Amino acid sequence: MRRLRTRLSTDVASALDLHPGERALAWANGPSGEWYVGTDLAIHLPAQHGYRRLGWEDVERAEWHHDSDKLAIVEVADWGEPERTTVVEVTEPGRLLELLRERVTKSVVCTVYSRVRGKAGLSVVGRRSPSGRGPTTWSYVLSVGLDPADPQVEEVAARALADARHELEDL
């Protein structure tokens, strides 16, 4: 049986904070009628007043839990800050999951891994908007158990960031 594609509501489309030329590419509904909209530049999530715009370069990762129809979107965090995770229920994800994977992957322009001690290490990740415009933003992914306040971790992170910036210059 073929599923019919739900059209994006014009009320929802007009409520989104779209940049000039930004286009809605995929969307999905939640069980209470909320909309989750992916564009070429961002994902738009329902918020208390309208929609919250989250650029693809600001998404660290996303996890789809098929058994519960839950989508967890983890945002890039500043050094030493906890990651913000938004969990939403999506009844029919449609093409939104594919777009999410594609755009988050496309935003990564550089990754450098450095070992801190033993098997524990950290990655420095450079991201840029999938449009190719704008600055490169840098984030860190630390192995479980590493403390960002540890001087050794800070030293390795600084060295890895310098390596990542150098690598990006060579591209």
Image (tube, helix red, strand yellow):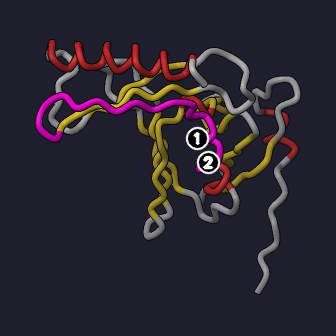
Q: Quadrant of the N terminus?
A: bottom right
Say left or right for 106 vs 142.
Answer: right
Provide residue 162's location: percent of width, then percent of height.
Answer: 40, 13
**Is-magenta flag for residue 114?**
yes
Q: Residue lying furthest left in this view?
A: 118
**Is-magenta flag for residue 96?**
no
Image point (60%, 64%), residue name: 91
Front in this rendered view, residue 168 or 5: 168
Q: Which mark is residue 100?
A: 2
At label 1, the amino acid type is: Val
Front in this rendered view, residue 18 or 167: 167
In the picture, residue 13 is in which quadrant?
Answer: top right
Q: In this figure, what is the number of numbered marks?
A: 2
Image point (23%, 33%), residue name: 121
Cβ atoms under marks 1 and 2 closer than 8 Å? yes
The local crowd at label 2, few if under 14, some if 14 to 19, many if 20 or more residues have their Cα within 10 Å, is many
Say left or right for 120 vs 136.
Answer: left
In the picture, residue 22 is in which quadrant?
Answer: top right
Provide residue 89's location: percent of width, then percent of height.
Answer: 52, 55
Q: Which mark is residue 24?
A: none
Which residue was labeled with disc 1? 104
Tell me the magenta residue range. 100-119
Element type at mark 2: helix
Front in this rendered view, residue 31 or 136: 136
Front in this rendered view, residue 150 or 114: 114
Image point (79%, 28%), residue name: 18
CA gap, disc 1 and disc 2:
6 Å
Provide residue 6's location: percent of width, then percent of height.
Answer: 80, 62
Q: Quadrant of the C terminus?
A: top right
At label 2, the amino acid type is: Leu
Element type at mark 1: helix
